[in-house]
Every structure is written in structure tokens, then in C-alpha cells.
């Protein structure tokens, strides 16, 4: 039996995030949460591998400072067998280093695995560091930016998208793979799958359960501010009697701006 | 001897820069030079690969005081373990206070793993970099899907930041003097095997280089209609781009403009039939002038545009082309 561990982040749904226009602060607390896209692709890929190979168990692993049960139920409905969650409100301000450290400790506590799947980056913070940090901590071969994946025996073959090339890479398991959104279209669980998922187990640990020393979690970075950017656009509506007039006005404005022509 | 301060920041000095992409390396040297002068410290470039010594002079002309050359067949192609072992070795031996790494698909994992191996912080994808009065590096990056810009600094050294392509201007080469230091470093063996590399079919012209970009979104009815944009692009010597759905969902294009695609800063960006979701807007934030053409008066793109036209792109684009031809003479 092969075991796949999929790292899932409960992320802020950035498409529903609101900004306080007076202070330019993000209203994060009131924004809905969901499984980070990318991570969802990683989970979908795990489920597809299981469908193909059969003898596979899928565990998800989530680190969160807020309750994540609803999000994890969705993961279980998509096809994960068991969800592990490190839930600890005191972990609110750890950085990617601390996050990867806890994930590594949790993976060690879960025990053996063949494949760790992650999303290339997260929907909200968009750092894209945790997967690589985790590979380093677990001393694993790492394949990132993966848009196509296959598992045969103990060998993983992956297609990576780079800036100017597509690379095919092989590695022996255990291995860590980070996927892009191109890799698949995550399924929407059926009612049947949702009902079945309610019987699946969610194992909850705290940082203390993992024996993680607090001093190891000190952030190496300091966030000075997170503010919505100022929009300093002119917002001039070009109107006219007909298309011709509008086009003439717009052309004139662009020439005056000095952004067209020689 | 200096006791390590509470923050452990005292013993590191100098700036180290690396990218496996030559142009990006030059851009980072420009910014690195600026920061090095401000901190009155030295700027070093890491040059690794196989038979790459010939590139050293150029790195010096672009501002490096030192070039650390590690020339080895094992470094001919990017392999994360190999490249990581070289950078780690240099970071441990030379103790730079700042390490800048090019934020490419290969460079970012490299930076993340270097930071982990050094137990250091890492701020990825900085499109602005500065130093504060306490010599700390301050990076600015887009976060929350383009909803915000975060300003982040460091509590420990080395301070590692990654820098995307085109975030900074390539400096003018100068008659700068620098030193070439050849190093023999033990190189870690790769844990993955690259079995095939296929160049991506992208146009030779990079969209980041375009002065004018005409982009389409879901308002474009069918693939062939991009001809409307192409024609306007010809008149303006510009390039055609698109938003993510046209590339990822409809597969009409292979690349797109936006937070997860190309971040562009043209003089003129014309968004046609693009609603303006925050992720797209994050990719065009630095455009000088933004024009929005959209049928939907409520489309959020109008909130971030300098000039907005509520109308049908199929009518506006040909008319705009003619008007520009006429007025530009």
C-alpha cells in the first residue's frame, strides 16, 4: 500500500476579500475560508493516483490557527481517507519556516509515506515557499511546478513548466511534488461522497502534541504593513454620440499621454 | 570579538546575488549595487555553471565588486541540490547580510531551501526593495491575490529575498572594477533525474518588453477574433495578451497577464472585454496608462482604468485603429 500525504492550507478566499477604503486594511477576519486552490489540485491528483493504482491511502495534513473542520470535510468528500490537523491558535504569526517545521514534525509523527503532494503556492499569501522548505526539512527529492504526474512502481515521473521550457523529471519515492493549477480540474464531491465523508476520521493535534519547541517557531521576518494598494487612476469615461467620436476622443487622449506613436 | 546580538544580525556583511537567468542577474545587480552603496558594503555575484567564466566580466560591468565563480560540469544544468550546495557553501563562508535570488520557477525553490538550510527568513517575489535605518532589508510584495501589498522586513541575517524578472531595470554597464574569485566547492548530487527538456513554444518577443499591450478577456467571442487586437497592435507596435480564462479555460492562448502569469508594465495597457478581477489587475498595476473597453458599465476594470469606454469591443477596436492611424499620420 502506498501512502500519499497532501498538505492543505485553509486559505482566505481572496475573491471575496473586502477592503476598508478609509484605512486600506484588509477585512481578513470576515472573509470566507476555503481549501487553497493549488492544494485542491494536489488533492485531486492524489485521488486520481488512487483511482488508478488502487492500493493507496490519502491523508491530508493541515496546519491552522482557526477551526478548519468544514474545509477538511470537503477534502474528505473529495476522496481523502483521513485528515490530520494541527490546530493551535498560538500559531497565528509563524512564518513559512515555522509552518514547514510543524508540517515536517507532523509528517514524522504520522509515520511512513511515499509521496507528499503540495500546491505550488497558496491562494492568499502567495509565497510559494512552504513546499520547498518542507522538502529540505524532510531531506526529500523535490519536483516543483508540476503540470503532469504519473506514478509507476516506486518511480514518479513529472512534467514541470518552466519559463521557457517543459522539463520531464524522474525521482524515486519518497518524493515531494508541488503542483500548479494546470494539472487538473478538481472534482466537486457528490452528495453521496459528502455523506460518506462524515464518517471519516479527523485527527487533531496541537503543537505541544508534536513536541515542537516554541523557540524553533520564532518568525525570522517581520510584517511591517499589509495594505490595499492606492489606486491613482484617472477613471475618465470617454463618451460620445457614436463609436467614431468615442474612438477619436480616445485616440487623442492617448496621443496626449505620450503613450502611442513615436 | 563581537558577541552575537540578540537578533544575531551583527556578524554578516555584504550582498550576494544569484540567478540562473543572466538578464535577471543583471537586473538584480543594478538594485544590489544601489543597496550596497547605501550600506557602504560590497556586492558579489555568484556565477555557476559549466564553461561560464566568460560571463564574469559582464557581471562586473553591471556592478559586481566580486564574482564567485564555481565552474563544474555538475552545474551545467540547473539541479536544485547541486546549486543549493554551492550557495549554501558561499553563504556559510562569506556570511552575507543580504542574499538576492532570481524568482524563477527554479530559483524560488532554491531560495526557500537555502533559507531553510541557513535557518533564515525569506521574502519572495519582491517588486520593491530598500533598506531601513537599522540596515534591515525591506521587501514589498503583492499578496492576498492582488488585494494588498505587504511590506516585510527581517529579524535575523542573512536576509533572503527573491526578485521576479523585470521588477527592476537593467542598469547601464559601467567601467567598474571587480575581482574574479574561482572556487572549488563540493557539489551535492542531484536527487532527481531530468529525462527530457522541451523548449516552450512562446513567441520570441516577451510580453514584458512591450510598450503597448492590447489584452482580451472573456468578452472575446471566439479565438479568431483576436485578429481585431492584432490589427490594433500592428498600428501601435504593441503585443497582444489575454486574461487567465482565455489561456487556462479556453486554451486560446498559452500565456496570460495577471498575478499567476506575466506581470507587465507597459506604457499603455488596453483591456478589452476583461472584467478586471483583482488577480488580473495585480499583473498590470505598474502600467503607465490603462484603458478599459467593456460592455458592462459595472465591470471592476473601470475602477482601475485611466480611460474607460463602455461599449462593444468589436466596434470600438476597429474605430480606434482608424482614429489612431489618422491622428498619428
Image: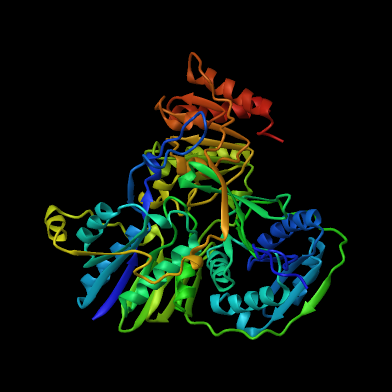
Q: Residue at x 75, y 67 (%)?
A: B44
| Front in this rendered view, residue B276 or A206 | A206
Question: How far across and how far down the image is residue A130, in percent?
Answer: 46, 64
Counting labels gives 0
Question: How far across and how far down the image is residue A150, in percent?
Answer: 33, 74
B57 to A174, vertically: above or below:
above
Colour theme: rainbow
Q: Quadrant of the C terminus of chain A?
A: top right
Q: Quadrant of the N terminus of chain A?
A: bottom left
Question: Left or right: where does residue B132 sit relative to residue B315?
Answer: right
Question: Left or right: where does residue B253 sit relative to residue B39?
Answer: left
Question: Left or right: where does residue B103 sit relative to residue B198?
Answer: right
| Front in this rendered view, residue A196 or A251 | A196
Question: How far across and how far down the image is residue B200, in percent?
Answer: 50, 63
Instruction: Choose top left, top right, bottom left or bottom right for residue A92.
Output: bottom left
Whether residue B305 is visible, yes or no, is: yes
A16 to B247, vertically: above or below:
above
| Front in this rendered view, residue A92 or A247 | A92
Instruction: Choose top left, top right, bottom left or bottom right for residue A254.
Output: top right
Whether residue A129 is visible, yes or no, is: no
Q: Residue at x 71, y 77 (%)?
A: B93
Question: Left or right: where does residue B219 sit relative to residue B48?
Answer: left
Question: How far across and how far down the image is residue A14, in percent?
Answer: 40, 44
Q: Residue at x 78, y 73 (%)?
A: B1
- Residue at the farthest top position: A241
Amino acid at each position: 500500500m502506498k501512502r500519499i500525504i497532501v498538505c492543505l492550507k485553509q486559505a482566505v478566499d481572496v475573491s471575496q476579500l473586502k477592503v476598508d477604503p478609509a484605512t486600506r486594511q484588509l477585512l481578513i477576519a470576515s472573509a470566507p475560508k476555503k481549501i487553497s486552490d493549488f492544494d485542491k489540485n494536489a488533492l485531486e491528483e492524489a485521488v486520481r493516483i488512487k483511482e488508478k493504482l488502487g492500493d493507496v491511502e490519502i491523508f491530508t495534513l493541515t496546519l491552522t490557527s482557526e477551526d478548519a473542520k468544514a474545509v477538511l470535510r470537503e477534502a474528505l468528500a473529495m476522496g481523502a481517507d483521513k485528515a490530520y490537523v494541527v490546530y493551535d491558535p498560538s500559531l497565528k504569526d509563524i512564518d513559512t519556516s515555522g509552518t514547514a517545521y510543524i508540517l515536517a514534525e507532523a509528517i514524522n509523527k504520522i509515520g511512513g509515506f511515499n509521496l507528499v503532494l503540495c500546491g505550488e503556492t497558496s491562494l492568499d499569501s502567495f509565497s510559494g515557499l512552504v513546499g520547498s522548505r518542507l522538502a529540505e526539512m524532510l531531506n526529500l527529492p523535490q519536483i516543483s511546478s508540476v503540470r503532469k504526474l504519473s506514478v509507476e512502481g516506486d518511480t514518479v515521473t513529472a512534467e514541470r513548466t518552466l519559463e521557457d521550457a517543459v522539463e520531464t523529471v524522474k525521482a524515486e519515492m519518497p518524493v515531494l511534488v508541488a503542483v500548479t493549477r494546470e494539472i487538473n480540474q478538481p472534482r466537486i464531491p457528490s452528495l453521496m461522497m459528502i455523506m460518506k465523508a462524515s464518517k471519516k476520521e479527523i485527527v487533531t493535534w496541537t503543537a505541544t502534541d508534536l513536541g515542537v519547541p516554541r523557540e524553533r517557531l520564532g518568525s525570522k521576518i517581520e510584517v511591517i504593513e499589509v495594505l490595499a494598494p492606492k489606486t491613482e487612476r484617472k477613471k475618465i469615461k470617454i463618451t460620445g454620440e457614436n463609436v467614431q467620436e468615442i474612438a477619436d476622443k480616445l485616440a487623442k487622449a492617448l496621443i496626449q499621454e505620450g503613450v502611442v506613436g513615436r | 570579538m563581537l558577541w552575537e546580538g540578540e537578533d544575531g544580525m551583527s556578524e554578516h556583511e555584504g550582498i550576494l546575488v544569484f540567478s540562473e537567468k543572466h538578464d535577471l542577474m543583471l537586473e538584480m545587480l543594478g538594485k544590489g549595487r544601489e543597496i550596497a552603496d547605501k550600506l557602504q558594503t560590497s556586492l558579489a555575484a555568484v556565477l555557476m555553471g559549466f564553461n561560464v567564466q566568460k560571463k564574469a566580466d559582464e557581471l562586473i560591468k553591471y556592478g559586481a565588486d566580486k564574482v564567485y565563480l564555481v565552474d563544474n560540469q555538475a552545474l551545467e544544468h540547473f539541479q536544485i541540490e547541486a546549486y543549493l550546495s554551492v550557495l549554501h557553501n558561499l553563504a556559510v563562508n562569506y556570511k552575507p547580510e543580504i542574499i538576492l535570488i532570481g524568482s524563477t520557477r527554479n530559483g524560488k525553490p532554491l531560495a526557500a531551501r537555502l533559507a531553510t538550510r541557513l535557518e533564515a527568513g525569506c521574502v519572495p517575489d519582491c517588486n520593491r526593495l530598500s533598506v531601513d535605518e537599522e540596515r534591515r532589508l525591506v521587501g514589498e510584495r503583492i499578496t492576498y491575490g492582488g488585494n494588498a501589498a505587504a511590506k516585510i522586513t527581517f529579524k535575523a541575517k542573512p536576509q533572503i529575498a527573491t526578485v521576479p524578472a523585470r521588477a527592476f531595470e537593467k542598469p547601464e554597464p559601467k567601467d567598474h572594477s571587480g575581482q574574479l574569485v574561482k572556487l572549488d566547492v563540493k557539489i551535492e548530487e542531484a536527487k532527481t533525474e531530468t529525462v527530457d527538456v522541451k523548449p516552450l513554444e512562446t513567441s520570441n518577443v516577451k510580453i514584458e518588453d512591450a510598450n503597448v499591450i492590447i489584452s482580451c478577456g472573456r468578452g472575446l467571442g471566439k479565438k479568431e477574433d483576436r485578429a481585431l487586437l492584432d490589427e490594433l497592435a500592428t498600428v501601435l507596435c504593441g503585443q497582444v495578451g489575454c486574461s487567465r480564462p482565455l489561456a487556462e479555460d479556453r486554451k486560446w492562448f498559452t500565456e496570460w497577464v495577471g498575478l499567476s502569469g506575466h506581470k507587465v508594465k507597459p506604457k499603455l495597457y488596453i483591456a478589452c472585454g476583461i472584467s478586471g478581477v483583482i488577480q488580473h489587475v495585480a499583473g498590470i498595476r505598474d502600467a503607465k496608462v490603462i484603458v478599459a473597453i467593456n460592455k458592462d458599465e459595472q465591470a471592476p476594470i473601470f475602477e482601475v482604468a485611466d480611460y474607460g469606454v463602455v461599449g462593444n469591443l468589436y466596434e470600438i477596436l476597429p474605430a480606434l485603429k482608424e482614429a489612431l492611424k489618422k491622428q498619428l499620420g
